[in-house]
Amino acid sequence: MNEQPPGGASPPSGPQQPPWQQGPPPGPPPQKRRWPWVLLGCGIAALLVVILAVACTGAFFSAMTAPPEENPGASDTTEGGGDEEGAKTSVGLGEPVDLGQWRVTVDSVETQTAYEGTSPQGEFAVVRLNVENIGTEATYFDSSAVSLVDADGNSHSSATTGSDDSLFLEQINPGNESPGEVVFDIPEGTEVTAVEVEDMMSPDGPVTIEVD
């Protein structure tokens, strides 16, 4: 008659290994290494940044060193060329020329030994001109905007006079025009070749009026 183990449990079937022959318990499954892919992604991102920086630098230097484009519609204005009168920068006596809000016409340049009872250091050159406001707002025309150029290339500034015909801070409303005179004290015997008018408030100019 077979004896039952205490507690009524059935004995284990088959041969049993002693505890010292049993292997260690299985550990957790090995994790896949992800750091090579992280490094590869960082390397690709850095390469893209370098390529973008090189491309931007090349585009910048190309734009800085590229020759300026020629304007096919530009005309030679040194000889009074141009399809429109206002595009001229060099005209003759009696010809109007536009400069900013002004339309200026120089009628004559004459020399005098005296002006309004005043004697010059050399001789007076009197420029007679007409100024029209072709803009939309009132503007001031001053004789300081006019200068004389002689045969040696020297530029002469206007003199201040108290004459009623002097264009000194003359306010002109839109559509109006004002004739007047600008007086210069120049060395005696100076050959005047041109009158220049410049509007400091306009990006255009100066314009040149050739004197025959």
Image (cartoon, grey):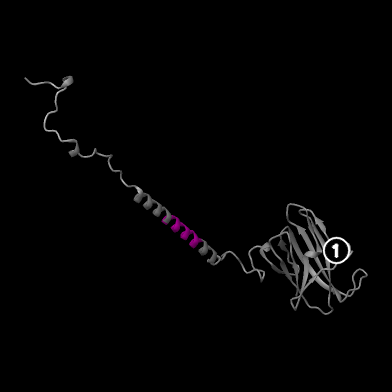
Q: Secondary structure at mark 1?
A: loop
Q: Which residue is mark 1?
A: 166
Q: What residue appears at the point 71 percent right and 62 percent down from the top-left corner?
A: 98
Q: Identify the image quadrant of the N terminus.
A: top left
Instruction: Name the foreground residue: 87 vs 158.
Output: 158
Q: In the image, is residue 81 above or below residue 8?
A: below
The location of residue 87, given as percent across then percent down, is 66, 63
The answer to whether residue 180 is left or right of residue 39 is right
Provide the major secondary structure of the magenta segment: helix
Q: Which image quarter: residue 50?
A: bottom left
Q: Is residue 80 magenta?
A: no
Q: Which image quarter: residue 209?
A: bottom right
Count of labels shown?
1
The location of residue 78, given as percent across then percent down, is 66, 71
Q: Identify the image quadrant of the C terminus.
A: bottom right
Q: In the image, is residue 50 above or below residue 37?
A: below
The answer to whether residue 23 is left or right of residue 105 is left
Q: Residues within 10 Å of mark 1 (few under 14, many from 20)?
A: some
Q: Which image quarter: residue 64?
A: bottom right
Magenta residues, as a range? 47-59
The answer to whether residue 186 is left or right of residue 89 is right
The location of residue 11, given as percent across then percent down, is 14, 26
Residue at the far right in the pictured view: 117
The location of residue 103, given as percent across then percent down, is 74, 61
Q: Is residue 57 magenta?
A: yes
At label 1, which amino acid type do we have?
Answer: Ser
Q: In the image, is residue 202 above or below residue 14?
A: below
Residue at the far bottom in the pictured view: 189
